[in-house]
Every structure is written in structure tokens, then in C-alpha cells.
Image: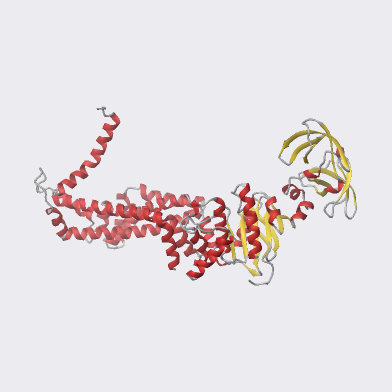
Amino acid sequence: MRRPSLVAVIAITVVTLLYAPIVLVIINSFNADKLLVAWGGFTTEWYSEALSDERVRNAFMTSIKVALLSTAFSLVIAITAAMWTRRALAGRRRLFDATTFLRIILPETVFALGLFLLFARYDIPLGIPAIVIGHVVFNSAYATIIIQARFSTMDTTLESAAADLGAPPWRVFRRVTLPLILPAVIAASLLVFSFSFDDVVTSLFLGGTNAETLPVLLLGMIRLHVTPEVNAIGVMVMLTTTALFAVAAGVISIRSAAGARASAKQGRAT
Amino acid sequence: MTDHGPAVRLSGVERQFGDAYALRGIDLDIADGEFFSLIGPSGCGKTTTLRLISGLDNPTAGRVEVHGQPMMGVPAHKRPVTTVFQNYALFPHLDVFENVAFGLRERKVPNDQVREKVGTMLELVNLTGRNAARPRELSGGQQQRIALARSLVLDPEVLLLDEPLGALDLRLRKQLQGLLKTVQREVGITFVYVTHDQEEAFSMSDRVAVLREGLIEQVGLPREIYAEPQTAFVADFVGGANRIPVGITDATASSYRVDAGPLGSWTSPGIAGLEIGQPATAIIRPEAIQLTGGDVAVEGRVTDLSFVGPVMNLTVACGEVELRCMVSGRTAQPEAATQFGWSAADSWIVAAEADETPA
């Protein structure tokens, strides 16, 4: 047998280190041993325990709401901003891009704290709306960069052609611009949804006592001790995000295969 | 269609970008049903002119009218004008049928009529049976025909074409030139055609305007522009004319006596209004120069020659002056001494350009 090369050994080690914790979480979520010191036999008890725990269910719903809302707002801001930057003067565009990058580069703790103090100063209550605002700060920046990248590969000729053929601005956007940037919009939604869904820092600062997202709840739970229930919750979170990506990937490939049909129907429907 | 004036009227149209002018004041009437071409070197303002007519851009001064209707403040999507773009600009996410149907959908035309109109139009441009194909699956020539169908199906009052054949090879160009001409005759719509290829413009157009640095240099029938260019620039642009600096020694109502130093002197027609002593340029087409001499005969030598099929391109020199000529059938030797000349009636006198000095 051939001796494995050094590169292969390094690669396998790295991959193992990256994925071992995840595998461990999955295995332990089915571990009947309550103290998780040894394999105590297979059980799904922790799952039913997690699912019947009202706090977990509430936190899960809070996370979903926050992620959906912040994704929606981020996309609207990002698409609008990216469309503006296409036509903006170079100097203004550079200035705007700087503000976008700042939202990504600055430590999350800094603006989470900033927002916290701002809200406190004006007596704005903490909770889901506050967390959503916090998440939009960085999520809209990521989405803007992704959608700008898509726009940079296309000029305005197609939109000019649509206007020339009688489409008013809103219809140009709906029938030409949006279909053309859709892959980027889907990619951006996935990314920012998952950023929002597993965010801890901002959610912790801005959640107050009213709203607790799933990652914040998990953090609280493991402070006491790691229970098998935590593992089960972790696995369920993993499944949710993986399923989301699978669906989106499917949507993208179906669209590119039958995009003409879909767009045509869209046109016919109106 | 209304009948209150020419299909397109531009009056004092200017377009300024910052400090730079793309158009410096264009006055132009394009008649209903005319095949009109705008030609000129790149940057002369011909594409800008189209954009001002289509409404994709607005003039900084002057008026644009379509059939007497002022177009000021009318956005592109409300103008009775459509455009065939240089790189087709077909919608990649729509199939052929939906590309052509795009504008009809905006007008909320019922489905069965859409099918009928799109079908008729695709037949007109000889492209049937590819309804479900995406634009990228088609050749350049086919894409161009879809772009044409997409614009024509809306039955515009004026169709603008921005170098529509620029990206195609020569054979396909010839073929599509024929198609464009046929289609235009069949639908009777005013075509405003932009190209940098004067041959293309001449072979298809009823009238041609030559643009230069944002101004119209000359408007007229193709034949007029070729035979009686009003400036040396026009003469040069439409067929690579020889320009010989001359001095005017005598002027009559219809002709000028000119002196070209070592090349001799002769009498020939020219533009109106030149005066004795004024620096001028004699225009002589390469095909007007013969090696057997003519009214004006000169001793010179061949400095360059190339064989291009039916004719031979020669450069002949007499002293400092080099002239290009096109001769058929004859063999010529490089560096050989030769006699050449032209018929005085075949030269044409225009005012000298600012950068030219008289002989």
C-alpha cells in the first residue's frame, strides 16, 4: 500500500478537528447517559424533552422571527443601495462603500453596545424589534456586497431596452432587474438568515428580558452544565439550516433550468 | 400615427456631459417612412442622437419632436419609438417568444393576439421554430433578428437602430442588410440607422447625415454626399479620398481654376462660395486616378502596391504628394516611374480644413 503523503495527513487531521465536535454533538444527542461520560445506550428522550420544553420552543420561534425580519429588511436595504451605487458618482460611491465595510469590520460588541445605550437613552424597549435592528446593521452590509457584486457583472443596457419597449420603472425592476439578480438575492438571504439565526452577541445585548433567541438560551443552559438536551437542540438547529440551504439550492437549479417558463408565466399573469 | 410634421425633428439639440459636448446643436428633419442613416467616426455623437430620440437620454438644450409631438419630459417607455441595440440587449432569462412579446405584455395585449403578432413578426424576420430557445443558444445573426422583431412588433412610429450589424461578420452583414431593407419597405416605418460604415449606410439609406464632433457636417442623398462632399472631412470619411492642397486662381459660377504646384493646374467643379486666393482642397477619388493619364497628367512613381482582387491599390507619388489610386487589370511595378492623371471633371474643390496649408 502507498504511504499517505504529508499533505493528506494534514488535510485529514484538519477536517477531523473541524467536524469531530459536530459528530460528537450528534452522537451525544442520542446518548442515554445523562452525564455524557460514556455511551449509555441509544435514546431519543432528549429530543422529546427539548421539544416539550416551552422555553426552547419560544426561543426557537423568537430566533425564526428575528432571522426572517432582519433578512427581509436587509434585502430591501441592500437592493436599494446596490441599485443606487450603480449610478452614483465615484466619490459618493466610495464613501457609501466605506460605510458598508465599516458595518462588517467594526466589532459586533461595539455597535451592539452602542445600540443598547442609544435605546436606553431614548427609552426604547429591548426585545425582538431591537434585535432585528441590531442584526440589520451587519446583515444589510453583507447583502449589499453580494448584490453589488452581481450588478458589477451587468450593465444597464437590458434595463434601457425594457424601458424602450414600454416598461415603466417599476415594471423594469420586476421583469428584468429582479430576475437577473435573483441568484444573488437568494444567496444573500441564506447567508444573512443564518448569520441572524446563530447570532449571540447582538441578541444578548438587545434582547433584554422580553426576547431570548435560541443561541442565547443555549448559552444560558450550558453555563450550568452541558445536558444532553443541549445537544439535541444543537442538532435540530443544524438540521433547520441545512434543510434551508438544500431547499434554496434546489430552487436555484430549478429556476435556471426552467427560468424562461417561470418568467414567462410571471409576464402572462399580469 | 399623427401627421403633424416630419417623423423626427431635432431643433438646436445639444447634449453636454460636464464640460464636454457630445452634440453641439443639431437641426435635422427625418421624413415619414424614410430610411435615414447617421454616420461618422466614433465619438461624433451619432449614438447620443439616437438616445435623445428614444428618451434614454435628454438634451441639455433644444427640442426633439416625433410626428410633431414634443418629446420634452416624455420618458422612454411612453415614446412611440423603439430601439435595436448594438449588442442586441436580449433578455437572457426569457425565451425567444417572450423576448419578442415583452413590449406587448406591457401593453396588456390579450394572449391570442400576442401569439399571432409574435408569430407574424418572427416570420417577417425569417426566424421560426425557435420560440422556446434562449437567446444565448442562438447565433449572432439570429439574435439580431429577434432584437429587430422585438422592436418592430410594437409598431413604433420610428425605429432606431444603433450599429445593429457591428458585431457580425461580412457575409452575415450583407445578408442582414438585405433583410433590413426588405423589412423596412414592407412595414413602411421610419428607420433611423447609426453606423460607422459608410458603404452600409449608402447601400440602404434614402438619405444620410455625416456627423463630426457633435455637429452635422452634411445631409443629403448618398450620391450627393459621395460626389459632392461639402467638406474635406466628408470626402475623406465616405471613401478615403485623396486631398490635394490647392490655391484658387480663378472662380466662375460653376467651377474653379486651381493651382496645385508640381501637380499642375486645372479647372473643376466644387462647393459654392469659394473665393480666389482662399486655401482649398481638391478631392480626387482613388478610382478616378488612371495610370494612362487624363486631362491632368503627372509624372511620378509607384511607392506601394497591393492586390485586392478585382482591383489593385497603388500609392503613387509626385514630389511630396502621395496619392492613392485604384486601378483594374494593369500590372504595375513598385518603385517604377509612371505617368498618372485624372480627368479635371472628376475632381471636386472644397475649402481647406484648418490643419491644411495651401500648396
Q: In which quarter of the image is residue B79?
A: bottom right
Indicate the position of residue A61 as horizontal and vertical percent values: 23, 60
Residue drawn at x 18%, y 47% is A26
The quarter of the rendered structure image containing the C terminus of chain B is top right
Using residue A39 as the reference point, say whether residue B88 is left or right of it.
right
Q: Can residue B313 be seen in this view?
A: yes
Q: Which of A133 and A70 is in front in this view?
A: A70
Q: Which of B68 and A143 is in front in this view?
A: B68
Q: Nearer the viewer, residue A192 or B263?
A: B263
The way the protein has been coloured in the rendering is: secondary structure
Q: Can residue A120 be seen in this view?
A: no
Indicate the position of residue A121 as horizontal and vertical percent values: 30, 60
Residue drawn at x 76%, y 54% is B225
Indicate the position of residue B195 as horizontal and vertical percent values: 65, 52
Indicate the position of residue B51 as horizontal and vertical percent values: 60, 59
Residue drawn at x 88%, y 52% is B255
Check the image and name the residue furthest to the front.
B129
